[in-house]
Amino acid sequence: MEKTTLYGGVNVDEAEAEQLRYIYQRIGFQCFRETLSEDAGKHLFEGGLNPRVLVSYYPHLRGAPNTADYTINLFAGVAEHMPPESSVEDIIAANLVRNYSPHLFPKDFLRKWRTRRVLESQGRGGQTISSNREDECAAVDTVLVKLFARNCAFARTSSYHCARGRTHVEPMLVENGQYNALCELLQQAGDHENLLDVWSKLITGGWSDEGVSDPVVTMVTYLTNLNERPDKSSTFAQITQKWALWLMHEKRAPEQGLKVCFDACVLAYLLLTKPPHTFRPLYQAHRQFPPPSPPLLPPRLSHSYPTSVPRLLIHLRNAPDSRTYCNEAIIGKHKPLLSFDLEILESKLGNHRAVLECLVRDVGDGVSAEAYCAVNNEPGSNGGRQVISTHVCRIIADTTEGLRGWKDVVIATAETEISNEALVQMLLEVYMSVDDEEKHDQSATIAATAGCTPSQFSSVTAIPSLIR
């Protein structure tokens, strides 16, 4: 027969233990009805009473763990002799006892019950509590946290299992200024957003707690650890970015925020989402803090950029609203790459002189310039001018993989009323306006243009351009 060891080393069988628990509970509730709190607590504890039964007499403490739909097994004789009142205040009023402290009794009882739970867990080799007792433990821990918060004697929450009753504990911790305990509770539950929100209020001075000596360092350390977790998800990255940007405000801790922000992915997020005036502090930041190591960069970018600083400088210099943005430099850098695109646009706008100047000076393609002066009569064209001749298009299409289906495409601008003679005269004027060194190189081209067929232009209109 299984034996049960009682306090004092007395061994009894299970049937006798059940009888003893019944007797202890009967005596305990009788003391409870007579407001003998100390005696009631001892006897109910020895009787192994479910703590939620006792907590149910304290409406201001029970909260969620005792309002859910649940059942508790009690001895038949005990249930009939429980106090009929709904709360401990009603019991006190019924007995006309005014010097009773209702907080002392449940706190002592629950602390003893919790101590016994810890000892039982250690006796089982540190195994966790069973699933059928989780609600019971949560109720005890929740009420204890509330009592400790009211008495400003809160212990560390790492050993409490009150995550389920957290929503009822948090308001009381805030009301009593137990912000350090609230942070420990939120950190235990893994509630990153609310935890960082509490630290933000401590940083701005809205809340104060001596238990949190330096909330800035605490927040930065937490964000850094969150950002370096091996299982970091996109949610963690968003949380890090959000609160690092919050720290970067000039009235908070901008340097500490930059330390958290100085990551390749975070910088890319800033450059894409923040307004241009925020680029300057980012530019200054890279001089104060070392750049991230190459493994932090995305794989496809790490081969091109050893660090994130060159990419940052490129954005700083090329942002249209940046103070360092130079229109002339940008145009000068992009114009050679987009010469043909600009020529097509100029031609559609009717700026023929600009087209010829671009073909002669920028591209150096006199053949295309001369072809532009002739009306396009190729199949599929609209009779307009061609910046890129049909012959050149076909050569490119035949020699470039993937473009052979486009060899018959004609890139012609809108039909224009300007005559060929006027265009040839413009072309000669462009040739004659170039520098002396370029003019020497293009002398053969000028002579060839002047020797065109008389149908293209008249000598009377060409001679003034040649002798100018």
Image (cartoon, rainbow, N blue to C red):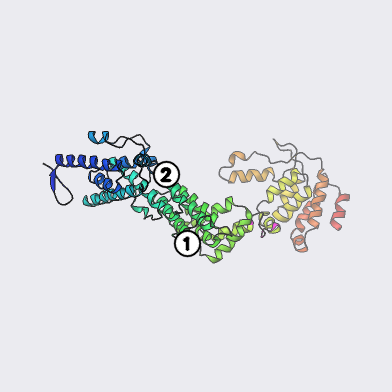
The reply to whether the magenta stretch includes residue 326 is yes
x 86%, y 47%: residue: 458
Label placed on residue 214: 1
Picture coordinates of residue 99 (x, y %)? 36, 48
Horizontal side of residue 344 vs 82, given as left or right: right
x 87%, y 50%: residue: 461
Picture coordinates of residue 406 (x, y %)? 62, 40
Horizontal side of residue 82 vs 168, given as left or right: left
Q: Is residue 67 above or below residue 339?
A: above
Picture coordinates of residue 236 (x, y %)? 46, 50
Label placed on residue 155: none
Asked whether the residues under the numbered discs 2 and 1 touch, taking CB atoms below 8 Å apart as contact, a structural biologist would say no
**Which residue is labeled 2 in the image?**
168
Res. 304 in view = no
Q: Quick one: label 2 or label 1, which is nearer the N terminus? A: 2
Question: In terms of secondary structure, where does tag 1 sit?
Answer: loop
Pick out the residue farthest to the left. 1
